[in-house]
Image: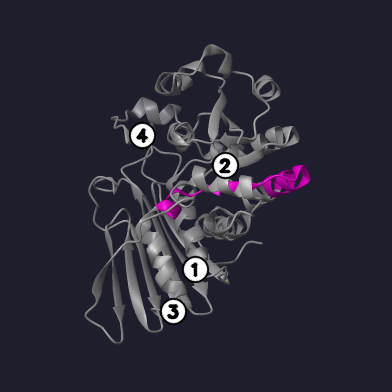
Amino acid sequence: MKKLKVVGLNFDHMHMGDLLRKCHEHPDVEIAGICDEDPARMQAVIRNFNLPPERVFTDPHRCLETTAPDFVILCPATGRHAEYVELVAPYRPHLFVEKPFAATVDEADRMIAAAKKARRLLAINWPLRWVPSHVTAHRLLREGRIGALQEVHHYGGNRGPLWHTADKLEVTPTAAMKRRSWFYDPRRGGGSLLDYLGYGTTLGTWYHDGKKPTEVTAVVDRPKGLAVDEQSVTIARYASGLSTFQTRWGTFTDPWINQPQPKCGFVLKGEEGTIASYDYAPTIRLQTRANPQGEDIAVDPLVPPFENPVQYFVHCIREGRPIEGPLSPKISRIGQQIVDSARLSARTGKTVKLVE
């Protein structure tokens, strides 16, 4: 079977290196090209995957015309997601976009429209979708182990977006790095709320089986000297009760090394029990009426084609299947609606109806 050709376009987000590594390791994928206006940002990928000069580009149109990729991975700053999808879609590759979905619902809709016009798949990468504890929690929920879901509570974050690069290699950020980084520029989609809230609201929508809240209340904390927030708290009112979603740049530790306190992850409350699912944990905690003291349950091992996002996306392309779950535009758009509502609430200081 012929390998699928992939192009990695725009290296604003450090997850590009992680995603291209998954492409490099996939037996049915070939890295046909990489492209960024700044050649320095591509050097690590060039070294890691031994890419020849003829596969390295600085002009996206020349890259797409030369390589004719089957799919493109896009990692621009959040505020440029719609721009880049509209640039790439006419070349008719499938589109894989790093989270969050977009800076606004309107921009998300532009992305959906561009992909629909090109008749190509559009997927949004939410790395937490591939954490076994959260996948196991979803299975138990769908099996009815805690009854009808009433509340989702999420705490998400890390020490900050500049504390690590691709492959989770640690660096120590400086004030100058913050001044240069798009993560700290509100015009380009910066801030912890826009960076991290979508994790909770999108997987929360997955857990809520596509249900939407009716209203949203949010507050943010913007440290002195910064143009963006580093902490946010969002409350979403559903017919079943209140769900809460918190973001934090500046956790005491990074959850993939040592879980901070509060722990990063999800707590689900149903009519008949609760589930605690923390990032990267080997077990989840299940509490039911029959067993109110609770028990630890080993997480499900992930199996092909659901071990990672690239594997899943390739499977959907090969089999002609729609994108489902948190990566789908349908679920991600609801998550984006809650994010937009939270931003509006934080800006106005009022509870708001869900942004449509």
Q: Is residue 68 left or right of residue 313?
A: right
Left or right side of 46 for 79 = right
> Which residue is disc 4 drawn over?
167
Residue drawn at the location 45% of the way across and 77% of the way down: 149
Quadrant where the C terminus is found in the figure:
bottom right
Q: Residue at x 58, y 32 (%)?
A: 6
Nearest-to-viewer mark from 4 and 1: 4
Inspect the image, locate mark 3, and give the three-letter code of the amino acid beneath it.
Gly
Of residues 64 and 111, the one drawn nearer to the viewer in this rendering:
64
What distance separates the C-alpha of mark 2 from that of mark 4?
18 Å
Chain-order first, disc 2 or disc 3: 2
Please provide the residue range marked out in magenta: 110-130
Please identify the quarter of the rendering in which residue 143 is found: bottom left
| Mark 2 surroundings: few (<14), some (14-19) or many (≥20) residues within 10 A | many
**Any mark on residue 97, and which?**
2
Q: Amino acid at mark 1?
A: Ala
The Cα atoms of the two marked residues, 2 and 3, are separated by 32 Å
